[in-house]
Image (tube, rainbow, N blue to C red):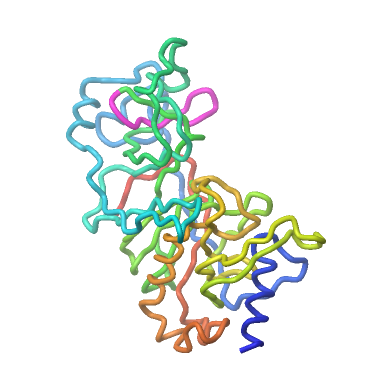
Amino acid sequence: MRRIIFAAMVFALICLSFANTRVVSPIVSSVVPHAAPAHADGGALFGVGECSKLTQETPRSDECDAEIAANPLPELVHPVDYDETRDGKGHPRSVMLPEAGLPFPIAWQKRPWYFSDAPGVLPAADDWTNARLIGHYAMYYAYAVVEADHALWYLIGPGEWMKDEFVSVLQIPERPEQVSGPWVAIDVTQQTLVAFIDDTPVYATLVSTGYWILTDTGLFQVYARTLSTTMSGPPGANPPEYILPATPWVQFFNHDEALHGAYYHNYFGMKRSHGCVNLAPGDAEWVWNFFDQTADQWHPSGTDTFFVDHPEKAPWVLVYESPDVPVEPTW
């Protein structure tokens, strides 16, 4: 038992800020390629139907308004409620994805901001009102995307455009050939996580991946996990610059990179960590339990051991960079 506890402490010390010596995880392979969609000259870079015809010069049409009215974002199930004791500052933002699919990409407002009437144009001086303010973590469809002033602008409602720096758009990657069962995909471009069973996406949430040190892209498998541990760092700091006790639901998948709960911030949708994948604690617990569905195949000893018993059978973790322009949903 002392050996198990010591191993957990060693890994925890290096997770948020990488150590010079890396522990090699057993399964690593190349990233799945993702082709960017074709761009429509002078028009929307993405869109379905009438909304795809909008441009910076023609940012609204009756036909697109009608299409939006006919396709409102449905009431999605939020599987994790906020719990102050468990979550601290980290508010879960997860949703269950309907099996039938969705007609447009869903998106989160990762920072409060005001929508504009056209791409690349700020509201008039007297129009910065609460009626235009989209709140933190509001959800909506991205009906179309137009590039203006070296930025992407998303159509989130009739004549309502939001700059990309305030938006995380959910993209659905293809399943890598060798992957089956429960697995997750982490998009470091949009800062999202999608949970799959085989080809079917079932759950999505926001994450924070590496900012100080980038999270590695690739295809990995969980090889160690612990319910809770203390994390501190960065390496070489004496005393440490931060000490984070009781970091929960920790699942290592690549050297010292892990999925884990982060109760100490609420900046999900933005890069923030030293390489790990931060989730709100409630979302980290959901992913832990999701992987536990098949734990008898790869970790029958459960929480009694730190290292997974059969890492070659453990759940897969895909970390990838999506195209800047979202792809039409395909499930």
Q: State the quadrant of the N terminus.
A: bottom right
Rendered image quadrant of residue 48: top left
What segment is highlighted magenta in the picture? 147-158
Is 280 rendered above or below residue 245?
above
Whether the magenta-drawn stretch holds residue 157 is answered as yes
Rendered image quadrant of residue 97: bottom left
Q: Report the residue at 35% width, 55% height from top.
A: 81
Residue at the front extreme of this rendering: 85
Is 149 rendered above or below residue 193?
above
Looking at the picture, how far across and down is residue 200, in whole percent?
Answer: 31, 63
85, 179: nearer the viewer? 85
Q: Report the residue at 51% width, 35% height from top.
A: 165
Q: Report the residue at 26% width, 20% height from top.
A: 61
Query: Magenta stretch: dominant SS?
Result: strand
Looking at the picture, how far across and down is residue 14, in whole percent?
Answer: 69, 67
Looking at the picture, how far across and down is residue 190, in whole percent?
Answer: 48, 46
Task: Give the number of callouts.
Answer: 0
Looking at the picture, how far across and down is residue 139, in whole percent?
Answer: 34, 41
Q: State the quadrant of the C terminus.
A: bottom left
Whether the magenta-drawn stretch holds residue 45 is answered as no
